[in-house]
Structure formats: C-alpha cells, structure tokens
Amino acid sequence: MAKWRAEVLLFDFDGTLIDSKVDIATAVNLTLGDLGLPLRSEAEIFSFVGDGVKRLLRLSVGEANQDAFDRALEVFRGHYLQHCVKTTQWYSGIFEVLQHYKERKKVIVTNKSLEYTLCIVDGLQARDLFQHIEAPRDTTELKPEPVMLERALEVLGADPSQTVMIGDSTNDVRAAQAAGIRACAVGYGYGNREKVVALQPEFYCETPHDLLDLF
C-alpha cells in the first residue's frame, strides 16, 4: 500500500516549531514587575501558554488584579517585542524537517498574534520557508476552532485530504479534526501527551526527527 503523501503541512508555532517559553516568561515577569504585581515562576507561566496572549496575561495578573489587564497587554507588548528572539530558537531537528519538505507547501497556524509571530519568523530569518502564516484575527478564531486552518486551505487552494496539521496540543488535534484534515501530534512540546494521544491523531511523533519521511 502506497504511503499517504501530504502536499500541505500546517504547523503550530510555539511548542512545535520553536521553543519560546523562556522569552515569554521573561516578558510576562517584566510586565508584572512594572505593574507592581507578584512575579510568577517560569513553570506557572509555561502552563499558561497555548491559548493566546490575552489568556496568558489574564492568568498571569491573577483574578484579584483583572483591573490591570488592559495595561498589562500594553506593557507586555513592548517587553515581548524586545525579548521575543533572545533565547527562542527552532527545536533541534526542526530546520532539517523544514528543508526536507521544501517542495511541499508549509504554513504556520498559530494562536500567537501575527505581530509577535512575524517578529520571531523574521528574527529567525525564516520568512521564505513558509508559503503562508495564519494567526487569529480575534479570540473567536483561536484553535481548537478550525477557522484559521480552513482559511489557510482557502488561501492556498489546497485539498483537505492532502493536508496535515502538526502540533503539540489538544487544540491542534481538535482543530484539525474539526476542519476534516489529518492530525500529527508531537510529544516534545508544551502539550499534555496523554491528553493529545487520547484524541487519536492519525500520526504521533516523539521527536522532530520522527517527522522526516512521515508524509
């Protein structure tokens, strides 16, 4: 039986392509410090990552300090744009994966804002590696909603049956399933492996190297 071939690879960003959590935590704590709020441990902040910057900051400022939320968004923007590529880098082996699939269409589909995503992509000199980048236009589009995946397919004129969504979280797998495309979960990122595997994605990779020749 011939191996299935993906013509379009949709990639989650944080926790799948890049390890960005330290820079995110740095910007969050600089923000909290500026606002006179208690700092968070890196582990706490890491657990808040994945559902967009608004949820990240709502959880970081804490329930008792939601009146500081709007100011936190503004302050965080300055700090994160300054720090977003201080330590952020590709996961080991990911650049090799992107080069291996250079003849396929590759898209970033992320819950991160487009401004931050482009800042990192350009900082890593990676704009030419991707045919398209999808980021949420508002909070209603955040994965696990399939909106961004469907829009990416429309922009590329791609066939869902020839597309795979690759990501580390349940949001990625659920978005793929809602969009009617195959899902590939990865076990090296920020997501909960047991919860991701329980959703029964078509593919699972423990390391970036496992992505080579899979599609």
Image (cartoon, rainbow, N blue to C red):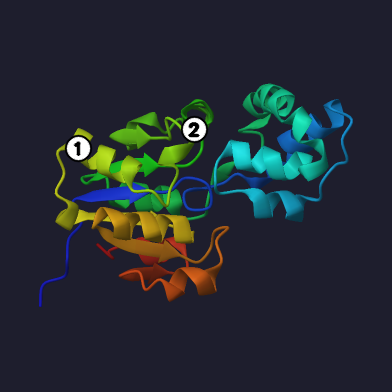
Report the residue that reaches farthest toward the bottom.
1
* Residue 50: image location, x then y, percent: 55, 49
Image x and y of residue 121, in percent: 47, 32
Question: Residue 117 has which mark?
Answer: 2
Mark 2 lies on a secondary structure that is helix
Q: Does residue 23 appear anywhere in the picture?
A: no
Residue bearing mark 1: 154
**Could you tell me which quadrant the N terminus lies in?**
bottom left
Dot 1 alpha-carbon crowd within 10 angstroms: few under 14, some 14 to 19, many 20 or more: few
Residue located 39% across and 70% down the image: 204
Is 7 left or right of 144, judged from the image as shown? left
Residue 209 percent location from the top left of the image: 42, 63
Res 109 → quadrant: top left
Instruction: Give residue 89's position: percent from left, percent from top.
Output: 56, 43
| Residue occupying image coordinates x 30% and y 70% | 202
User: Which amino acid type corresponds to the residue marked 1 in the rendered image?
Assistant: Glu
Please rate how many residues cluster around mark 2, counting C-alpha atoms within 10 Å: few if below 14, some from 14 to 19, many from 20.
many
Which tag, 2 or 1, sits closer to the chain's start? 2
Quadrant, the C terminus: bottom left
Q: Quadrant of residue 28?
A: top right
What label does residue 108 carry, if any?
Answer: none
Q: In the displayed structure, would residue 29 be above or below residue 96? A: above
